[in-house]
Amino acid sequence: METSLTNTYCHGCKTFKALSEFMGHGANSISKQLKTCNNCRQRFTQKRKRSAVINNQPNILEVIDIDFLSEVITNLLEDTSSNNQELHLHCQVNDVNDVSYHRNSTNEYLSKELANKIIELIEDADGYKWNYNHQYISKNNITYWYYCSQRDIQASKSRKHSDPSKQRDTLSMERFDCEGIVKISIDKTTLLSEVELFHKNLHVRPIVKSVPEDTKSNTFLVDEVGTRTI
C-alpha cells in the first residue's frame, strides 16, 4: 500500500516507479503525467520503428496496445502542430486486459465500454472534446462515430427558457470547418478495435469552464428524501 502512495503504476511493465518517470507533454506542449514509464515508451517507440520497416505495406494496419494509444497521438501532434497540419491516425487497438476482466459481459456492453475508453485516451492526448454521434451494429462488428465538439455541423440553436426572467445569455462556442471525426469499429468476438481519427485543422482547444465549489453547494439543497429545492 505504501508503494502505491509514493510511486505510480506503469501500465506497460506492470510495476510501480517514481512519478518523474511518467512525465511527458500533451497538447500544446503542456506537461502531463502519462500511463507508461520512460523505459516502456522508449521500447515502444523502437518497436514501432522496426515494425514500420518490416510491415511497410499500405493495407496492413499497425496494432497498438491501448496503454500506448495516448503516446502515439501525442507523437503525431508533435509532428503536425508546428505547421497546423491535419491529424490522421488509422490503426488497430488491442486491450487484452479489459477483455479478460469483462469476460462474462455482453458484447454490446464491452464494445461501448471499450469505445468510451478509447475516446477518453484520445481526448487526454489531443486536448479536444469528442461527442458521440451515432452507431451501427452489423453481424460481426459494432461501429461508433464521434465528432469534434467544435466542428461546424455540431452547432445548434439553444432554446430559451419560457420564463423571460430566467433566460440567460451564453457565449457560443467557436466553430471550425475541421471535419473532426473518430470512427471506432470493434470486432464482437475478439474486441480488436479499428480506430480512425481525422482532424483537418488543429484549431484551438475548447475552453473548460469549471463551476466554483461554493456555487455548486449553494445552488441546490438536497434533503434526506432527495427533494431538490433552491
Image (cartoon, rainbow, N blue to C red):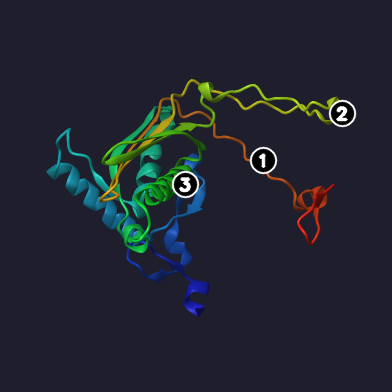
Rendered location of residue 24, percent (x, y): 44, 52
- Between residue 146 and residue 179, name the one nearer to us: 146
Please tell me which residue is depicted at 46% across the width and 24% down the height of the picture: 178
Please tell me which residue is depicted at 26% across the width and 50% down the height of the picture: 189
Crowdedness of circle 2 by 10 Å Cα count: few (<14), some, many (20+)?
few
Say what amino acid the circle numbered 2 marks: Ser
Spatial CA span between label 2 and label 3: 38 Å
Mark 2 vs 3: CB contact within 8 A: no
How many discs appear?
3
Identify the element where label 1 is drawn: loop
Q: Is residue 120 left or right of residue 228?
A: left
147 shown above or below 188: above
Spatial CA span between label 1 and label 3: 18 Å
Observer-side mark, 2 or 1, equals 2
For disc 2, the marked residue is: 165
Please tell me which residue is depicted at 79% across the width and 26% down the height of the picture: 162
Say what amino acid the circle numbered 1 marks: Lys
Rendered location of residue 171, percent (x, y): 70, 27
Can you tell which quarter of the image residue 154 is in? top right
For disc 3, the marked residue is: 120
Rendered location of residue 38, percent (x, y): 36, 59
For the view shown, which residue lies furthest in the bottom direction?
A: 2
Observer-side mark, 1 or 3, equals 3
Of the numbered discs in the image, which one, if any, rests on residue 102?
none
- Between residue 81 and residue 93, name the one nearer to us: 93
Identify the element where label 2 is drawn: helix
For disc 1, the marked residue is: 209
Q: Is residue 5 left or right of residue 157?
A: left
Please report whichever mark, 1 or 3, sits nearer to the chain's N-terminal start: 3
Please report whichever mark, 2 or 3, sits nearer to the chain's N-terminal start: 3
Crowdedness of circle 3 by 10 Å Cα count: few (<14), some, many (20+)?
some
Q: Is residue 149 left or right of residue 53?
A: right
